[in-house]
Amino acid sequence: MGYDMSKFSLEGKVALVTGASYGIGFAIATAFAAAGAKIAFNDISEAAVERGLKNYAEAGIDVKGYVADVTDEEAVAGLVANIERDLGTIDILVNNAGIIKRIPMLDMSAADFRKVIDVDLNAPFIVSKAVIPGMIRKGHGKIINICSMMSELGRETVSAYAAAKGGLKMLTRNICSEYGEANIQCNAIGPGYIATPQTAPLRERQPDGSRHPFDAFIVAKTPAARWGTPEDLQGPAIFLASDASDFVNGHVLYVDGGILAYIGKQPQ
Ligand code: NAP
Ligand code: GCO
């Protein structure tokens, strides 16, 4: 009866992680490499890709890096074609690239709102649409969308981001619905509050040297009583990218230290 642990292996698989020069995408890509996958990543600028290639080289990981803006359909078509030329058809896609603009809604321009929606929601549609035909030809595929606490919760100043990440949860379920029969599993990871450049403004020391109020707030809201690290997401990402999760589809796996289950610590 036992269990074939090789189902957790990504040996021989081709993985694209978008926006993975650093941060969460970089951590997921390095985990996939450790599990045996061939890694492709993109970023929006040559400088970011060069930075990423340096980071991977320092980690001893062989990757292919490409310049592509995930909101640009033509650039994404070229990205996928270049990966197929260099590594082969994509087996695993992680829609990781993302931005946030923390602006009170009444102060936010429609242009800023649209920009966040474009990167965080339209781009996962564009990249998935470019990758799914190859997965159908291969007879299998794994898509992992990077959702958020804001796929479930709102908070002041993140209206565009929450709308995008809520929509990304439903795009995840819809890709599952449309392509499950083609043996494509589309799931999401919903990270909690993770210490990356994206959240650095929420953790920085105050001018008087004191702790950022939001830092204390999040630690009080997290049963694990700490910020997450990109490494906390690596195991869950390998699981959702592997054969071990072939009957998991349309699911958002929250990796949040328990935030969504917890009312929060009583203020002292
Ligand atoms: P990050 O540090 O800001 O990194 C985002 C990456 O995406 C950067 O490499 C960025 O490149 C790239 N990117 C942005 N726009 C792009 C575009 N149009 N085309 C290609 N690449 C683009 O963010 P992170 O914290 O690692 O987050 C990664 C993902 O996890 C995002 O989707 C974020 O919403 C999500 N998330 C983060 C947290 C958290 O607490 N950190 C929690 C939940 C979900 P540049 O550096 O060149 O801009
Ligand atoms: C914020 C943070 C969050 C995190 C993450 C939480 O301003 O509230 O940036 O949105 O990035 O999405 O899961």
Image (cartoon, grey):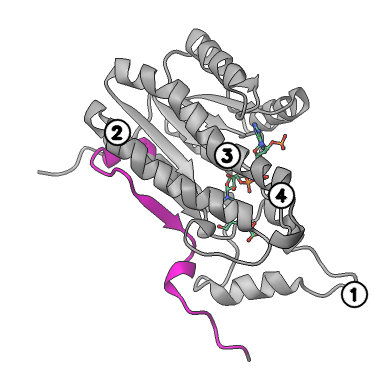
- Quadrant of the drawing holding the C terminus: bottom right
Name the residue beneath numbered marker 3. Answer: 25
Q: Earlier in the sequence, mark 1 or mark 3?
A: 3
* Separation of residues labelled 2 and 4 (CA atoms): 35 Å
- The residues bearing labels 2 and 1 have C-alpha atoms spaced at a distance of 53 Å
Within 8 Å of ligand 1, the CB of disc 3?
A: yes
Q: Residues within 10 Å of mark 1 (few under 14, many from 20)?
A: few
* In the displayed structure image, the side of residue 2 where residue 162 appears, left or right: right
Query: Mark 1 vs mark 4: which is more N-terminal?
Result: 4
Tell whether 266 sits left or right of 89. right
Amino acid carrying mark 2 in the image: Glu
| Mark sitting on residue 95 | none
Mark 4 lies within 8 Å of ligand 1 (Cβ measured) = yes
Report crowding for label 3: few under 14, some 14 to 19, many 20 or more residues within 10 A (C-alpha). Answer: many
Do the numbered discs 1 and 4 sit on residues whose CB atoms are within 8 Å? no
Quarter assignment of residue 108: bottom right
Q: From the image, tell me which residue sits under label 1.
A: 208
Q: Measuring 53% from the left and 58% from the top, which residue is drawn there?
A: 150
User: Is 186 placed above or below 199 here?
Assistant: above
Please identify the quarter of the rendering in which residue 58 is found.
top right
On screen, residue 97 above or below 57: below
CA gap between label 4 and label 3 equals 12 Å
Magenta segment includes 255: yes
* Residue range (magenta): 241-267
Q: Is mark 1 within 8 Å of ligand 2?
A: no
Q: Please give the residue where the numbered disc 2 appears in the rendered image.
A: 178
As drawn, the label of residue 197 is 4
The picture quadrant for ligand 1 comes to top right
Residue 239 visible in the current orientation: no
